[in-house]
Image: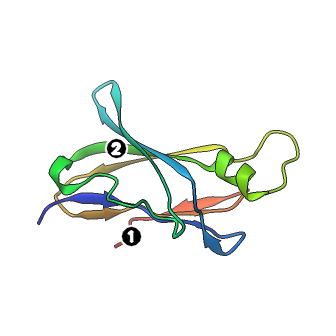
Amino acid sequence: MAGYLTTHVLDTARGCPAAGLKIELYRLTGGTRALLRTLHTNKDGRTDGQILPEAEFETGIYELVFHAGDYLDDSGAAVDGPRFLDVIPLRFGMSEAAHYHVPLLLSAYSYSTYRGS
């Protein structure tokens, strides 16, 4: 089985997919944090392709950075002063060649994630 990475972002406050949300993928090796790609979610809250495709998959430590503040501003979520959530980094490990699905459930004041399928 080949490994790859996907995500799905849902706006739980509005009850819809989070379309147009910027996501960055980094690989961490030792003290180095290298940007691998930048993507945006589509109308279904997913990226159009795998975030880390099978051909580029390596086990190791990664970080998905979700630019929630920009998305929330564009969605019209009310802001009183600095936004509570802005950039959400999720650091995780991939230890074997498998499908890793890392969804984000988002609102203006909270988020959650899990290893999906």
- Where does the image place residue 98, in percent across and percent down from the top left? 20, 63
- Where does the image place residue 18, in percent across and percent down from the top left? 59, 63
The residue at the point 73 percent across, 58 percent down is: 75
The residue at the point 29 percent across, 51 percent down is: 52
Mark 1: few/some/many CA within 10 Å (<14, 14-19, 20+): few
- Where does the image place residue 57, in percent across and percent down from the top left? 20, 50
**Residue tagged 1:** 116
Secondary structure at numbered mark 1: loop
Q: In which quarter of the image is residue 114?
A: bottom left
Q: How far apart are marks 1 and 2 (CA)?
A: 16 Å
- Where does the image place residue 109, in percent across and percent down from the top left? 73, 56
Give, as a three-letter code, the residue at label 1.
Answer: Gly
**Residue tagged 2:** 62
Q: How is the image coloured?
A: rainbow
What quarter of the picture does the C terminus occupy?
A: bottom left
Q: Which of 52 and 102 is in front in this view?
A: 52
